[in-house]
Amino acid sequence: MPPVESPNTKIRPSSSSINDKGHLVIGGLDTVDLAEQFGTPLWVMDETTITAAVAAYKEGLSAYPDSLVLYAGKAFLCLSMCHLLRRHGIGLDVVSGGELHTACQASFPAENIYLHGNNKSEGEIRQALIAGNVKIVVDSESELSLVASIARQLGRRARILLRLIPGVEPDTHQHIVTGHEESKFGLALTDLFPVVRKIISLDSAVELIGLHSHIGSQSHAMEPYWQMIDILADCFVDLQASFGLRLSQIDVGGGLGIAYNDNDRPTPIYEWAKGIAEHVTSSFQQRCLPLPKLLVEPGRSIAGTAGVTLYRAGHKKRLPSGLTYLFLDGGMADNPRPITYDARYTAAIANRMNAPAPLTPLSLAGRYCESGDIIIKEAFLSAESGDLIAVFGTGAYNLSMASNYNRTGRPACILLSAGKAEIIVERETVDDLLRQDRVPERLLR
């Protein structure tokens, strides 16, 4: 039986409720108290939601003989997240030296780490090979040459997957589509054979173990994944027939979406994972191929719904046109997704959850000096100055994309579990903003 819960289909975290004061409660804790204790803006992560999402993926893949969930660290990563994922026995997809260093500092098993990226530096490749059995997902022919060169220098043999462009586009924003023919990521299918010939010539330094593809992010449909799996399976057939290669791994990426508002209808996690496993099975069996190890790379669907951002409402302004702004004490520096690709969110008044909705909306605007710094353009909330505003679905790509724009510090992030709130990322202070600054001596005279 599938898990009862699929967090990615809900707007609020799994443990959320409303108490007798009409306050939003997450993880058994009153968000009004959390805001008082830790300040705002505040990133709140619900461990119950993360755990439920991981369990749904593992259960959906359970019938497949050999599989591994790789959490896409770019969505939300810190030391505590690495430790939490390690305890759940899943792997990690990293895309930079910083993410890899974070994983290593958390004692994450190297054999379950995969290094991605379209422009890996020599230092990052070297770092991965020194760390141990980190797999490298090669993105271009020139990168392949660099990996081989560094592997020889270190006396190692790099275990690699090739990232391919399948020419498949999911139902998502163009800025987060990665599988189309003009994507900056991956090798064109027509380049596969020449690159494999080069790999064979580099045999002592490089071992090709599998193929990878990722078609995009925040997808709700399954059909594009079927197309991509069939394309990769055909590549397995062609490589075996032409070169005698029997690859052992297939990585189908991630990209499953979450519900940011009532109109979103993403495929539930269990159904997505089960469907992927079944289609890989049927696709490879139809081609008389042994089943490879199956890798999936969810990020948003594990961390996204778990996250809530708490803001304190400041000034309220009504314009002659009738538009009303309610200004928040955060905005695009802690959540650049709305201004970057028109991301949509759902909000609530955390200290008055039962307040009736008004007939006309207001705009929840950020505090930063950009006209486009709008978190929600039309929020049907009867919110006033001083209210605590909760924005849901902010666990993915908020902390990881945050900035110090306008010389402001990043918020704190707390993890909620079993009625306990713990800081996992400290709030940046004004002194933190100066820490990397240096003043030439001549300017001090």
Image (spheres, helix red, strand yellow):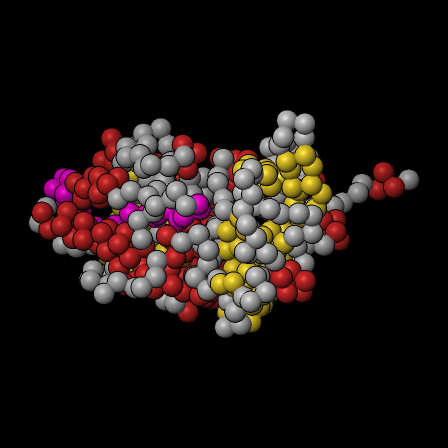
Residue 255 in sight in this render: no
Residue 201, position as x, y percentages in the image = 26, 42
Of 425 and 173, nearer the camera is 173
Quarter of the image that includes the C terminus: top right
Residue 26 in sight in this render: yes
Tell which residue pokes out farthest to the right in this image: 445
Of 390 and 38, nearer the camera is 390
Left or right: residue 295 compared with residue 367: left
* Residue plotted at (32% across, 32% down): 180
Quarter of the image that includes the N terminus: bottom left
Vertical relation: 443 (above or below) 80: above
Residue 396, position as x, y percentages in the image = 48, 50
Query: In the image, is residue 358 part of the stretch drawn in magenta?
Result: no
Vertical relation: 335 (above or below) 173: below
Residue 128, quarter of the rendered image: bottom left
Q: Which residues are magenta?
A: 237-261
Left or right: residue 98 compared with residue 142: right
* Residue plotted at (74% across, 46% down): 437
Residue 321, position as x, y percentages in the image = 64, 26
Residue 44, position as x, y percentages in the image = 55, 58
Tell which residue pokes out farthest to the top in this image: 321
* Residue plotted at (69% across, 51% down): 386
